[in-house]
Amino acid sequence: MTAPARPPLIGRTDELRSLAELFEAARTGTPGVALVCGEAGVGKSRLVAELVARAERSGAVVLAGAAVDVGESPPLLPLTLAVRALAREPAGRTVVEPWRGELEALGLLPPSPGGPVQAVPHHLDTAGRVLLGLAADRPVLLVVEDVQWADRATRDLLSYLTAIMLDARLLVVVTHREGGGSPGLDELGLGGLRRHPRVRGIPLGPLDRAAIAELVAREPLPETDVDDPVELVWQRSRGNAFIAEETVRALRDRDPMAVSGTLRDLVLGRVRALPEDARTVVRALSVAEGAVSHEVAQLVTGLPPDRLLTAVRHVVEEGSVVLDGPGAEGGDDGYRLRHGLAVDVVSADLLPAERRDLHRRYAAALAELTAGGDRSAVAALLAHHWDRAGDDARALSAAADAASAAERVHGYADAYRHWRRVADLVAGRSVPPRPASEPVASVGLDRPVSLERAAEAAHLAGEHDAAVNVLQERIGLTDPADPRRATLVARLGDYLLAAGRGVEAEGAYREALRLGGEAHVALLAGHAEALQAAGRFADARDEATRALAAARQAGTPDEQARVLVTLGFSLAYLEDTQAGAAALAEGLRVAEASGSPAVLGSAYHRRAELLSGPLNALSEGIDLALAGAERLTELGLGRTHGVRLLALAANGQFRCGRWDEAVEVIDQAFRARPSGSEALDIRLSRGRMRVGRGDLSGAAEDLDAVAMLAHDTVGARYRVPMLTLRAGLEMFLGRPERAVGHTVAGLDVVGKGHDDVWLEAPLIWHGLRAHAETVRLDRPPPAHEVVDRLRESGAGLHDRARRAVPMVAGLVGVFAQMCDAEVTRADGDSDPELWGEVAAQWRRRDQPYNVAYGQLRRAEALLARRTRSRAAADALVEAHDIAADLRAVPFLEEVRDLGRRARIRLPDLPPEPERTGYHPEPAAVAEQVPDELEVARPARPRVPAARPPTRRDVLGSLTPRETEVLAEIAAGHTNREIAQRLFISEKTVGIHVTHLLAKLGVRSRVQAGAVYLRAAPSETHPGS
């Protein structure tokens, strides 16, 4: 019966590599001992099982057994279990048969029927001789699990083997449970193993959060009430593999608590076995939040000091409780339960009255210990415990304090949660009459104000959709005639814009205009910002000009900074770079002085976007973006403005060829777990990087996510870059006709009244490039009206560039030149001089990837004209060197393909950089590419690889050039097309065809192509 497939090992790449290295060394005569240590359930057995499977596949002898916690176990029990398991298999019986007498004498095998068994006087010597004898014939892997329960003979054997193994082909793997009351290695008499040169310690710590996420994602989970399964599993297990897997299993079984019966019984059985005082400590800690100081534990449990110390020492040594830093209110080391699982199970086992009483005790203890001092550090805990104790009056006051304290340290996610609770409590849903000494008025809040502050905190925390929902709730409480309604609706527009919901945002601003008129500063500022985000820079400039005058008259620095940023960007883009840059710099200074982190984030963003984008001041823009990201992270906005700035930095690094740096910056941004428009920004950055590097399935995943996240907006800001990248992706997939479709869709999005020509220029170029590719690949051309629209758009770039400021005009002008050059390419007369100028222009602007593209097309055009072969070779080598340095895989393949067809010798590729971390095997990577994204092979067939002399066949008599011509014939190309593709004359092609027909003994081109398809290796077949 076939054993069920074992799921892939997760999160143990380094440890498994260490074990594999030791095993490989043992196979070649360098024996060793691996000591795998870790707490119960951390995954020691699973790791060793992976090594055992590898060893078995390699043909090694595997002896794997585990000690058992049964008190006085028989001698050499793990080895006995291992030997008998091996002897049950036919191949294993062959291995052990020569040693049957010794094994029976040791008691490792049952005695043969009727045969005498002589007990051996020196069991260590005999067992060692057997194991080393086995290792003389083939590699041996000996595994002893749970050595903390092993008998004395087994422990002595391990020490003895370590001393005598010499050059045996033997690896011994020992697992040892640490903590939880298990004896240490010194207690077991194995302390010397740690110091022996043959022994390598492999400590196994908890899995990290990424590994837990991978574990949860291994199989789809059913719909449950759990908002974030990864967070639940992480908090409950703290990286313990067993607890994590059991929690995931419970989620799959739809357990309402996500706790399997196995785990629940295990935890409760362990707690009920504790002494009474120890149980009191564990139950008290189960309702705590974080570490609890000894002083708080004293007040909550009510135990006398000596009994508390005895109880705490017991549960720490037993492993239920760990020391984990100071308690929230200070004091000495804090106590907490080892795993979140124990928290959930033990607290659920309490009676409701017990649970409320413990929360009340915690709140009272914290209040007593912080009386007369600053309670900001414990405000959140006080709010939580008073809330769970059912004292809503005290919970309200503490929640307001906690919200304010969180805002002071830029903890906006916590502030949102607390303000939301304040709003619910103030609403009177469950608040009893407040004591006279604590009037509600003392808090200074009502429900509308609490909702406003909750919405703003959610917005700053990056929870933009939550901010929208809370503010809509707040607006619902406002009288239609209330003059503040316009301000609130304008702020709703801000939140919608941050959430990437541009259409709804514009509607909100229009509603605010209708309610508030043009004199309202915040309304004008928000509307100007929305117009700019929509690419309507002229309208944004005019609105910002009016808003700036109103802001200065009102003396509101926040709005002044916000308007200056919008005005400066529009001015710098449209008419006066210096004036715009000055306005942006002033906006940044005012934002710093105003103390508004959100406005400061917008100032950094707009200035960095201008520099690293249309003004092409790449280094300055990248540096500003990175500095701004660091500054905004310090202010608690790393998840929002910080991510947006990192995306800008990565885009600039992509343009100037610093691709490895861009990858690191993108990874940094994703670690912040962005949402809303920030998620769109960084997804686009990573999609661009993935297209360039050749991770085409990953790029498609990012672009699909952008399309899904941007469903609420039809604006160009996200959809045009997404469609531009989709076009580039389709071209590398060999589907230029689809690329044309994406470009046309992008032009429809832009429509009229859009001033962001810098955004449109790459889109238009991609469309004309895709048209030229359909010609190169002999694909059906786009409809005439589509081609006309693309060419008109390309020609119009020249006029639009001339109307922009010089720096923007210069950059857009290069794209206009590229469009002109693509037109000549599509018309069959690609202009090498024009392509050379394109490359030179990009070189002056420090954008190497585009330089390489221009040089590739220049070489292609020169070769097509069969002139200046040296210049073509130089251009192609430069394109190759740039692409190889960037590791731009799909583009590099196109360069090398042209070199092959033109017979230009290109430099050898540099070795791949050493990879770190986990990387799937090539086969695994291939499986991840969905069918609809299968990478198309080049339409041009490759030259068949050289074959061994033993493979003489019908193609063996052909010259390399004749083989190339035959491959083109098999692809269905005419003599003229073959001449163009191989850069030779049509007459020369005709001569080659005549020779081919004669050598192959066929009469027609069709027959010749059939011969090639039958004889050539499958990977060289056209279209394969």
Image (tube, rainbow, N blue to C red):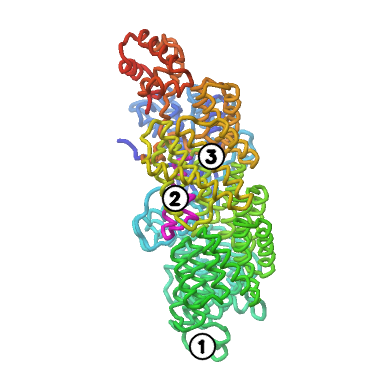
Query: What's the mark number on residue 214?
Result: none
Picture coordinates of residue 23, whole percent (x, y) = 53, 31
Query: What's the mark number on residue 434?
Result: 1
Q: Is residue 256 left or right of residue 241?
A: left
Circle 3 SS class: helix
Q: Is residue 280 left or right of residue 262?
A: right
Q: Residues within 10 Å of mark 1 (few under 14, many from 20)?
A: few
Spatial CA distance of label 3 from label 1 is: 73 Å
Picture coordinates of residue 802, whole percent (x, y) = 58, 49
Residue displayed at 48% across by 25% down:
134
Picture coordinates of residue 682, whole percent (x, y) = 53, 52
Q: Quadrant of the N terminus?
A: top left
Disc 2 marks which residue? 747
Mark 1 or 2 closer to N-term? Answer: 1
Q: Quadrant of the C terminus?
A: top left
Q: Is residue 34 magenta?
A: no
Q: Is residue 710 magenta?
A: yes
Picture coordinates of residue 127, whole percent (x, y) = 50, 30
Spatial CA distance of label 1 from label 2 is: 62 Å
Q: Please state which amino acid type lies under the numbered disc 2.
A: Leu
Most distant residue in the bottom direction: 436
Q: What number of labels is visible?
A: 3
Q: Is residue 750 left or right of residue 253?
A: right
User: 505 or 202: nearer the eye?
Assistant: 505
Q: Please state which amino acid type lies under the numbered disc 3.
A: Met
Mark 3 or 1 closer to N-term? Answer: 1
> Which residues, given as a range, are shown in magenta?
695-721
Q: Residues within 10 Å of mark 2 (few under 14, many from 20)?
A: many
Query: What's the mark number on residue 818?
Result: 3
